[in-house]
Image (cartoon, rainbow, N blue to C red):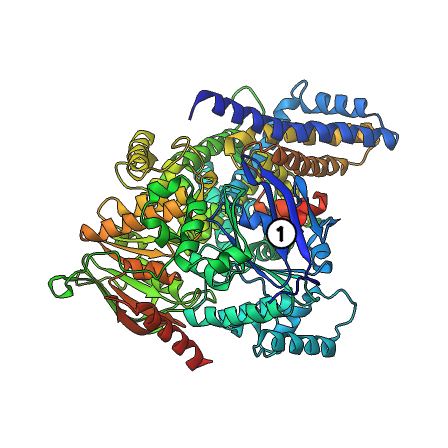
């Protein structure tokens, strides 16, 4: 691989990843103008509440669960397994921490209890993914549907647990007992960022190394590129589907438990931050590279942290943040289309999705020959 | 035979079509006259397919015109082509397997309601015209390939055609089915339709065509008119066509040229071996396979391959060749029966342990199964040895070792690639096939299963691939050759077994003339017997 091509590829990847974000910000600004809010005030607010003072520490704390969810999604997406059950998996991990925490911290040393909670959370997530994984591996069912359905069930189960056995009897609202500050994840010295952030960054680096430099990573890539090729080179597809799903779901559940032990300390019924919805387009922008996801997740963490207050100040609903995320997805698709026409490098949308999305844009003649 | 007074001329003038990096058609001009069969000859990549997709409205020419009797028309879409009465039968079936014949034929109807009665009537007319019997309510998937092709022809002529284009119609047919097709074409011609027949087999062009146009590198490099072709003897016609087809390469390809172009009956080209001296390398005893998909499974297959032997498996595409090769390679589980390799029972071992024993598999799906197009040539060359030393050490890839091996194989097999880091998917089909052969035949290969090894390759690569296989056998390697190309099987195999619906239905020792007929006999016998 020579230097220029590496540099070029990097530049192309950069352009195709950053341009959609910039366009989304510009257009969202125009929308704000149109509905009578001030985009300048909003973005200034994002800056103020997301970065200035000690606010950047809140943003980085939010990064911890977001980044771990992103890694979980990447692991599955690299193998072309579309695990969309992330909301349920996240909540299962969260309820493991908020439910078991108050019990375990009473009987075990905090350090040991934390480890136990993390391990159990990962296992719960992994086990929950077995059903879509086995259905996919054995019968070829569409994992998008099965994982989504399993997610709905998980959300219900979590709410039942919080209203049932994990409910704090001391308060009337359905929520788990609050875990004492002493038992929560420690802060990075000198800051108020819990060490979940460090864990997330470390996981990203490890995942990057494993996926790009080891035989396991290559196997995942072969499996993702073509299950037929995977069978041809002697990979066990059944095992691969189950493993990738378990890793993905386990990581996302871990994110939930980190979030409870690092940030929230308790869990209310019907609470669902839906991190996965926001993270998913970022994962595509990072082209399924864990380390490349870090800046995108950081960007979103600032936007989300600052945006919550800024949107209220600018007279917008908090849901406006999702509009921006949606616009990023939209512009990503358009940039992809233009990039494709210029034959820039590899594409980051799966071929099937790209075809479907781009179909209406094609000219008649191209469409028929495709 | 032609009534010149009423015959219409479809004239293509200076058709030029360029794709990134290649000019597919370079100022091609030709006249297609109704009531004539116009043969279009040329090897893969000569521009035949582009030319017909322009006629079919699937591509627009960059420049040049199509005219009917001097009136220029613009074929902007397949629908327009159909409205002008241009019907195309593609090389691969475009029928929807789950639909009946009639439903398939009515796909092109534009009216809101299905007029089944009228459709049945039309099918009856066309069946009469083609001289075939087609059950309108049979599922397309239940038809034999010959019948499927008849349905495709009926579909192409559904709206009253003026031009019927047949793209390599004989490539999947038995000798007997080719005869039927010839009769149907003659009847269509007699109706006053123009027929364009695309082929790369010379003898078919001579037998079926009224005139011949030869394409090479996107150019029209030779035309033999009606009178001229009628005046030529077969040998003269062959010489003229060969000279045009290969041009300057003729000397380089030499005697192979006529074989490659399918000029004459094929003859065996491997040295005879004495089976008694040769130990059995692979033995299948009553093996049936069990896959997850819907393709035909191997069913009670018993066969032996000796050391240094090439065993050909003939059969129509999709009759269990895939299952049989996967069973031997270890990719598909065995439901019953036993697989022996060098006397050892390997029924239960998987792809990777068989790979290490020396069992290799060159799949027919080069692009999606054999290689990972998005990965580099170098990685593709070692992809079957993932995790093994020296390319991986404790799980970590060793780029230097991979590059060294890649360079060696690229050199040895003459793989034309800009660099070992080039993505494999960007190479030509021939070079991708060389990657597969290089990977499978290296590092202690003893038996190689090859499925349709020359399908879709250019003639020079076809020649090279066959040489590689003959060489491999001459050095004591065993080859299980599955092919739909009877000529190829006859040239390469010591023995030929015929597969039909997953079972072997007969075997022929390839030791002289008449092999093709015997094999063809087994093929049709098996098919008609079960229909």
Q: Quadrant of residue B491?
A: bottom left
Identify the residue position indicated by label 1 in the image.
B31
- Residue B55 in picture, x, y percent from top left: 64, 52
Query: At 33% across and 36% down in the image, what residue appears?
Result: B410
Report whether B116 appears left or right of B219. Answer: right
Nearer the observer, B370 or A285: B370
Q: Is residue A63 above or below residue B225?
A: above
- Residue B124 in picture, x, y percent from top left: 65, 78
Nearer the observer, B36 or B59: B36
* Residue A69 visible (yes or no): yes
- Categorize mark 1 by other alpha carbons within 10 Å: few (<14), some (14-19), many (20+): some
| Image quadrant occupied by the N terminus of chain B | bottom right
Query: At 77% across and 36% down in the image, what residue appears?
Result: A320
- Residue B264 in picture, x, y percent from top left: 36, 59
- Residue A28 in picture, x, y percent from top left: 77, 31
Q: Secondary structure at mark 1?
A: strand
Nearer the observer, A193 or A238: A238
* Residue A82 visible (yes or no): no
Using the image, name the chain to which the residue with label 1 belongs: B
Name the residue furthest left: B277
Q: Is residue A275 above or below residue B199?
A: above
Query: At 54% across and 30% down in the image, what residue appears?
Result: A292
Q: Is residue B7 above or below residue A53?
A: below
Report whether B457 appears left or right of A180. Answer: left
Q: Looking at the image, how many numbered discs can be counted on the residues?
A: 1
Q: Quadrant of residue A236?
A: bottom left
Nearer the observer, A255 or B301: B301
Q: Is residue B248 above or below residue A237?
A: above
Q: Quadrant of residue B108?
A: bottom right
């Amino acid at each position: 691989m020579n230097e220029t091509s590496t540099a070029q590829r990097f530049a192309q990847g950069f352009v195709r990843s950053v341009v959609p974000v910039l366009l989304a910000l510009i257009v969202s600004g125009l929308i704000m103008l149109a509905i009578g809010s001030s985009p300048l005030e909003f973005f200034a607010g994002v800056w103020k509440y997301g970065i200035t003072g000690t606010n950047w520490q809140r943003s980085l704390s939010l990064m911890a669960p977001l980044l771990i969810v992103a890694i979980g999604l990447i692991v599955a997406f690299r193998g072309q397994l579309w695990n969309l059950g992330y909301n349920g998996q996240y909540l299962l991990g969260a309820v493991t921490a908020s439910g078991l925490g108050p019990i375990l911290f009473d009987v075990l040393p905090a350090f040991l209890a934390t480890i136990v909670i993390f391990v159990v959370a990962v296992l719960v997530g992994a086990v929950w993914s077995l059903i879509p994984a086995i259905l996919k591996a054995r019968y070829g069912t569409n994992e998008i549907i099965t994982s989504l359905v399993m997610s709905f069930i998980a959300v219900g189960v979590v709410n039942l647990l919080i209203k049932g056995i994990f409910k704090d009897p001391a308060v009337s609202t359905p929520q788990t007992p609050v875990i004492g500050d002493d038992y929560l994840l420690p802060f990075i010295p000198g800051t108020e960022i819990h060490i979940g952030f460090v864990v997330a960054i470390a996981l990203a680096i490890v995942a990057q190394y494993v996926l790009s430099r080891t035989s396991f990573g290559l196997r995942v890539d072969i499996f993702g590129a073509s299950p037929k090729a995977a069978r041809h080179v002697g990979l066990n597809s059944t095992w691969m589907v189950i493993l990738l799903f378990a890793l993905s779901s386990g990581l996302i559940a871990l994110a939930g438990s980190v979030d409870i032990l690092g940030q929230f300390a308790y869990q209310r019924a019907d609470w669902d931050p839906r991190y996965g919805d926001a993270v998913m387009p970022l994962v595509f922008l990072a082209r399924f590279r864990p380390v490349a996801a870090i800046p995108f997740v950081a960007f979103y963490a600032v936007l989300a942290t600052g945006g919550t207050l800024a949107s209220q100040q600018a007279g917008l609903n908090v849901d406006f943040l999702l509009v921006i995320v949606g616009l990023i997805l939209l512009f990503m698709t358009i940039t992809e289309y233009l990039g494709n026409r210029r034959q820039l490098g590899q594409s980051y949308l799966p071929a099937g999705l790209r075809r479907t999305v781009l179909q209406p844009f094609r000219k008649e003649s191209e469409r028929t020959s495709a | 035979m032609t009534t010149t007074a009423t015959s219409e001329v479809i004239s293509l003038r200076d058709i030029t079509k360029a794709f990134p990096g290649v000019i597919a058609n370079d100022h091609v001009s030709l006249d297609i006259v109704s009531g004539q069969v116009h043969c279009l000859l040329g090897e893969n990549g000569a521009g035949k397919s582009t030319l017909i997709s322009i006629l079919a409205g699937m591509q627009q020419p960059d420049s040049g015109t199509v005219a009917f009797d001097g009136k220029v028309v613009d074929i902007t879409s397949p629908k327009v082509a159909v409205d002008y009465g241009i019907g195309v039968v593609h090389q691969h079936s475009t029928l929807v397997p789950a639909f009946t014949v009639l439903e398939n034929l009515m796909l092109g109807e534009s009216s809101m309601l299905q007029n089944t009665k009228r459709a049945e009537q039309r099918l009856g007319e066309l069946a009469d015209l083609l001289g075939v019997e087609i059950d309108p309510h049979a599922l397309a998937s239940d038809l034999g390939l010959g019948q499927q092709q008849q349905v495709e022809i009926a579909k192409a002529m559904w709206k009253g055609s003026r031009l019927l284009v047949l793209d390599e119609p004989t490539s999947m047919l038995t000798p007997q089915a080719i005869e039927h097709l010839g009769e149907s074409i003659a009847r269509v011609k007699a109706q006053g339709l123009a027929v364009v027949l695309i082929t790369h087999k010379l003898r078919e062009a001579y037998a079926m065509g009224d005139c011949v146009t030869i394409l090479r590198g996107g150019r029209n490099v030779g035309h033999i008119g009606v009178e001229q072709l009628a005046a030529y003897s077969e040998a003269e016609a062959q010489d003229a066509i060969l000279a045009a087809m290969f041009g300057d390469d003729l000397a380089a390809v030499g005697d192979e040229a006529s074989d490659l172009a399918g000029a004459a009956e094929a003859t065996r080209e491997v040295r005879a071996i004495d089976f008694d001296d040769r130990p059995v390398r692979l033995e299948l005893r009553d093996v049936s396979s069990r896959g997850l998909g819907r393709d035909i499974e191997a069913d009670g297959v018993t066969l032996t391959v000796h050391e240094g032997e090439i065993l050909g498996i003939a059969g129509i595409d999709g009759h269990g060749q895939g299952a049989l090769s996967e069973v031997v390679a270890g990719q598909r589980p065995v439901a019953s029966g036993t697989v022996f390799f060098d006397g050892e029972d390997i029924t239960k071992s998987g792809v990777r342990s068989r790979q290490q024993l020396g069992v290799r598999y060159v799949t027919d799906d080069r692009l999606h199964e054999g290689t990972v197009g998005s990965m580099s040539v170098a990685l593709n060359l070692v992809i079957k040895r993932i995790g093994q030393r020296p390319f991986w050490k404790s799980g970590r890839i060793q780029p230097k070792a991979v590059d060294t091996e890649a360079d060696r194989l690229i050199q040895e097999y003459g793989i034309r690639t800009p660099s070992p880091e080039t993505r494999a998917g960007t190479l030509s089909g021939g070079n991708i096939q060389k990657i597969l052969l290089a990977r499978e035949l290296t590092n202690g290969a003893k038996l190689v299963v090859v499925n349709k090894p020359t399908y879709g390759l250019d003639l020079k690569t076809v020649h090279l691939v066959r040489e590689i296989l003959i060489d491999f056998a001459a050095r004591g390697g065993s080859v299980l050759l599955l092919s739909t190309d009877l000529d190829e099987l006859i040239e390469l195999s010591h023995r030929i077994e015929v597969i039909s619906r997953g079972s072997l239905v007969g075997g022929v020792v390839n030791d002289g003339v008449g092999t093709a007929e015997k094999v063809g006999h087994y093929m049709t016998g098996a098919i008609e017997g079960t229909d």
